[in-house]
Image (tube, rainbow, N blue to C red):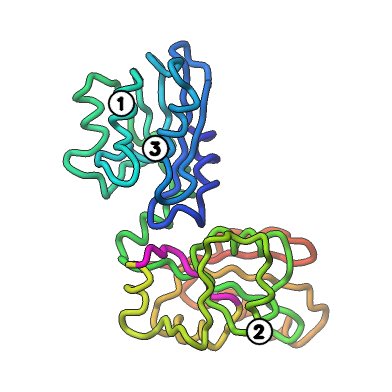
């Protein structure tokens, strides 16, 4: 299942509005023989890719999948039917799909005589699926503010680190100031939407609903402190990613402790990113 979780993360930033899912197929004697993940909307799901790679060797085997196999036919076939047709004997599921149709894919698999286990490493699978599931409950995209803290305090010049590139590649859209448009690296997700801050007001009633309806599930607010202040005031920011530069003995370091994390957020990750320290904070829900 941990292998499937790692695979699922390859779909971050490219599958929306679908969830990023991973799947590993084991032979009847328990040896891994194939793997797959959902790469982008409209293409094969994780189970379909893994079963195609496994071929006839999947018969009598086990499928470990991070999300309950889908129970409906859309742009891709119903994954529970693909598993049934492939002769899979056992399915191990991390997270149950809250959007599943009817009684759900797990129930359909059991009805077909397949052994099903659920909630296997669910907490770990939610490291990838959690943001997708949260947007379902909120019916709006997840908003992330990324900013840098240098000797003079908050700056809109984000560090050109691999971690910053990775953050941009994992979201569906970036809301940016016009001077940042050319600074977005060419290695980002090619399907990512660029939203100029001067023409996109996320605080306007209905704007987040419009993005959600367009399939956007995550938006990165890239550097703009003035825009982020409005989003914070309206309670719309869900996560912050902060790059902290060693400022030396400066006033910003001595007096700027409050800049490290906005009120109402808790620190969930700290690490190095080149010459910067990268911190991640999440909103505290009461």
Circle 2 SS class: helix
Q: Eyeballing the image, is 3 above or below 130?
A: above
Disc 2 designates what residue? Answer: 179
Name the residue located 31 percent from the left edge and 38 percent from the top edge.
77
Question: How far from the left and from the top, in percent, is residue 37?
Answer: 48, 39
Q: Nearer the viewer, residue 63 or 279?
A: 63
Residue furthest out toward the left: 102
Q: Could you classify mark 2 by the number of other residues whose Cα lies within 10 Å: few (under 14), some (14-19), or many (20 or more)?
A: few
- The disc label shown at residue 94, or none: 3
* Location of the C terminus (image quadrant): bottom left
Whether residue 45 is in magenta: the answer is no
Question: How far from the left and from the top, in percent, is residue 58?
Answer: 43, 18
Q: Eyeballing the image, is 39 above or below 222?
A: above
Residue 258 image-quadrant placement: bottom right
Q: Could you classify mark 3 by the number of other residues whose Cα lies within 10 Å: few (under 14), some (14-19), or many (20 or more)?
A: many
Q: How far is mark 3 from mark 1, CA to CA?
A: 11 Å
Name the residue located 30 percent from the left edge and 45 percent from the top edge.
97
Question: How far from the left and from the top, in percent, is residue 5?
Answer: 50, 40
Disc 1 designates what residue? Answer: 116
Circle 1 SS class: strand
Q: How far is mark 1 from mark 2, CA to CA?
A: 52 Å
Question: How far from the left and from the top, in percent, is residue 212?
Answer: 35, 67
Q: How far is mark 2 from mark 3, CA to CA?
A: 43 Å
Q: For the magenta stretch, what is the residue range? A: 214-222
User: Sequence order check: which comes first, mark 3 or mark 1?
Assistant: 3
């Amino acid at each position: 299942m941990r292998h499937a979780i790692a695979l699922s993360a390859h779909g971050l930033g490219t599958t929306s509005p679908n969830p990023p899912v991973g799947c590993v197929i084991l032979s009847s004697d328990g040896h891994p023989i194939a793997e797959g993940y959902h790469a982008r909307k409209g293409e094969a799901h994780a189970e379909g890719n893994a079963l195609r790679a496994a071929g006839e060797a999947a018969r009598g085997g086990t499928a470990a999948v991070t999300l309950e196999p889908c129970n409906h036919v859309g742009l891709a076939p119903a994954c529970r039917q693909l598993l049934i047709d492939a002769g899979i004997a056992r399915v191990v599921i991390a997270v149950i799909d809250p959007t599943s149709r009817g009684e759900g894919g797990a129930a359909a698999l059991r009805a077909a005589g397949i052994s099903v286990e659920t909630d296997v490493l669910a907490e770990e699978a939610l490291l990838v699926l959690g943001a997708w599931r949260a947007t379902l409950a909120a019916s709006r995209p997840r908003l992330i503010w990324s900013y840098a803290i240098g000797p003079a305090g908050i700056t809109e010049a984000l560090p050109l680190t691999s971690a910053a590139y990775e953050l941009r590649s994992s979201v569906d859209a970036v809301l940016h100031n016009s001077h940042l448009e050319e600074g977005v690296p060419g290695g980002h997700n090619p399907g990512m939407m660029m939203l100029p801050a001067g023409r996109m007001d996320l605080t306007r009633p209905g704007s987040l609903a419009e993005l959600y309806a367009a399939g956007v599930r995550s938006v990165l607010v890239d550097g703009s402190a003035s825009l982020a202040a409005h989003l914070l005031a309206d309670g719309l920011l869900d996560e912050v990613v902060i790059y902290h530069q060693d400022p030396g003995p400066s006033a910003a370091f001595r007096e700027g402790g409050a800049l490290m994390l906005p009120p109402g957020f808790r620190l969930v990750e700290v690490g190095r990113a080149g010459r910067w320290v990268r911190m991640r904070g999440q909103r505290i829900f009461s």
